[in-house]
Image (spheres, grey):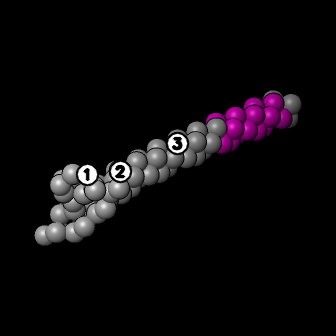
Amino acid sequence: MHLCIKKCMSKFYACSEFSSPVEVGSVDGQLRKEEEEEEEEEEEEEEEEEEEEEEEEEEEEEEEEEEEEEEEEEEEEEEEEERGWEL
């Protein structure tokens, strides 16, 4: 079956050697719709990646803060022990 596409009044039609032209819809609109869907999917993926990165960064910051707090507590304990020895 031979198909051809011709533009008529901003609509596209498919025609074959065996049948009369049949409207298949606006190819431009179809392509735009597909592009928009792809863009939306890409944006969603990017947003998910950004959220994951932010979560990882927050976790790293929390771990660093916990480590700093532990170090400060250890330093305070050492200072208290030194003071105890001085008395």
Which circle marks residue 52 in the picture? 3
What type is the residue that disc 3 sits on?
Answer: Glu
Q: Is residue 26 visible to the viewer in this orientation of the structure?
A: no
* Residue nearest the observer in this picture, 49 or 38: 38
Q: Nearer the viewer, mark 1 or mark 3?
A: 1
Give the answer, above or below, for where 11 lies relative to 54.
below
Question: Within the magenta stretch, is there residue 17?
Answer: no
In the rendered view of the protein, which quadrant contains the C terminus? top right
Give the answer, above or below, for where 31 lies relative to 6.
above
Packing grade of label 2 (10 A; few <14, some 14-19, many >=20) is few
Mark 2 or mark 3, which is nearer the start of the sequence? 2
What type is the residue that disc 1 sits on?
Answer: Phe
Q: Which residue is drawn at 17% across and 55% down?
A: 20
What is the CA distance from the residue labelled 1 to the residue labelled 2? Answer: 8 Å
What is the CA distance from the residue labelled 3 to the residue labelled 2? Answer: 50 Å
Mark 2 or mark 1, which is nearer the start of the sequence? 2
Question: Within the magenta stretch, is there residue 71?
Answer: yes
What type is the residue that disc 2 sits on?
Answer: Met
Q: Which residue is drawn at 18% across and 57% down?
A: 21
Q: Residue at x 22, y 62 (%)?
A: 12
Q: Magenta span covers which residues?
A: 64-83
| Left-right relation of 53 to 79 | left
Residue behind mark 1: 18
Q: x%, y% of residue 33?
A: 28, 54
* Residue nearest the observer in this picture, 62 or 1: 1
SS for callout 3? helix
